[in-house]
Amino acid sequence: MTTHDRVDQEDEAGIGSMATAPGGVLDLLRVAAVALDVEGRIALWSPEAEQLFGYRAAEALGRRADKLLVHPKDRRAAVELFARVRAGDTWAGIFPVRRPDGSTLKVEFHTMGLRDAHGEGYALGLATDEGTVRRLETDLAVSGFLIGQSPVGLAVFDTELRWLRANPALQQMNSIPESQVRGHRVGEVLPGLDVEAIEAAMRHVLESGEPLLDQQSIGRTPADPDHDHAWSESYYRLEDPSGRILGVAVSIMDISRRHRETSEISEARERLAVIADA
């Protein structure tokens, strides 16, 4: 094996060790990349640009972007923005783009100036469908509201069963802030719980993808260290849009009162059975 071959293998190993699975958010956004030369002609056109704008690379490359992608009434504004970016400004905002069928698509852009090795200037535009961005923002806002306002305890763990999130209801339930549980396993911060059963349930959900509902456990937390509490826990596997497994979500309800009442009813029935036998 030559030194060159060994270096290539080491480089590949290094890349492999650093590489991680892609995030699902970028898959959802389908960010397109377009570069314009000093004359405003399209010099680079990514496959995502074909999907977003509707023009094949052969139809777009070498064409003036303002004449291909912009309706006549918007061309003056497009030329002014291009001049600002060429001068060194960055610009982010929504701009209407003309598709091949004449329809208009609102596109969210982030643009910046680039220089090549010869000092030639280019304008790079990163673009995605404005409707997709708004839907994603809405989904994130709703998710954040539900997590923050839910009276049910909510926890998120990664694939190594390490704590990622604990909503306010769960922080109050355990009397431990999220900052103290993040990155730790359950047993490291809450040894008074049935850790073995909880982690077994999470592993089952991670491996099978099947949710586990209303799993009951008993234990103690710093919120009430002198008394046993009972909880109902439901486990769900979390996946991104591409199917990549992100971890496990757990919803937790304190059912101590119901558990005590059930126990009292069971004891009363046993006493009645003894009396009846007597």
Image: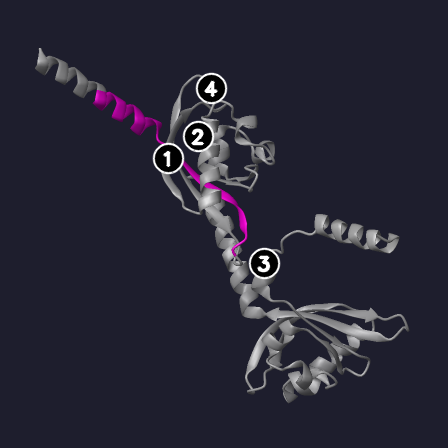
Q: Is residue 88 magenta?
A: no
**Res 40 quadrant in image:** bottom right
* Label whose residue precedes the other's in the sequence (1 or 4): 1
Judge the density around disc 1: few (<14), some (14-19), many (≥20) Cα neighbours within 10 Å.
Answer: some
Q: Is residue 48 left or right of residue 63?
A: left
Instruction: Give the secondary structure at mark 3.
Output: helix
Q: Nearer the viewer, mark 1 or mark 4?
A: 1
* Label whose residue precedes the other's in the sequence (4 or 2): 2
Which residues are the magenta region?
243-266
Q: Does the CB distance between marks 4 and 2 fall below 8 Å?
A: no
Q: CA distance from mark 4 to mark 2?
A: 20 Å
* Label whose residue precedes the other's in the sequence (3 or 2): 3
Quadrant where the C terminus is found in the figure: top left
For label 4, the residue is 225
For label 2, the residue is 197
For label 1, the residue is 215
From what the image shows, is residue 51 above or below residue 204? below
Q: Position of residue 17 (x, y in %)?
A: 71, 48
Amino acid type shown at disc 4: Pro
Residue at coordinates 86% horizontally, 55% vertically from top-left? 4
Q: Position of residue 236 (x, y in %)?
A: 44, 45
* Label whose residue precedes the other's in the sequence (3 or 4): 3
Instruction: Give the secondary structure at mark 1.
Output: strand
Q: Is residue 242 left or right of residue 56?
A: left
Amino acid type shown at disc 1: Gln
For label 3, the residue is 25
Q: Position of residue 199 (x, y in %)?
A: 48, 33
Amino acid type shown at disc 2: Ala
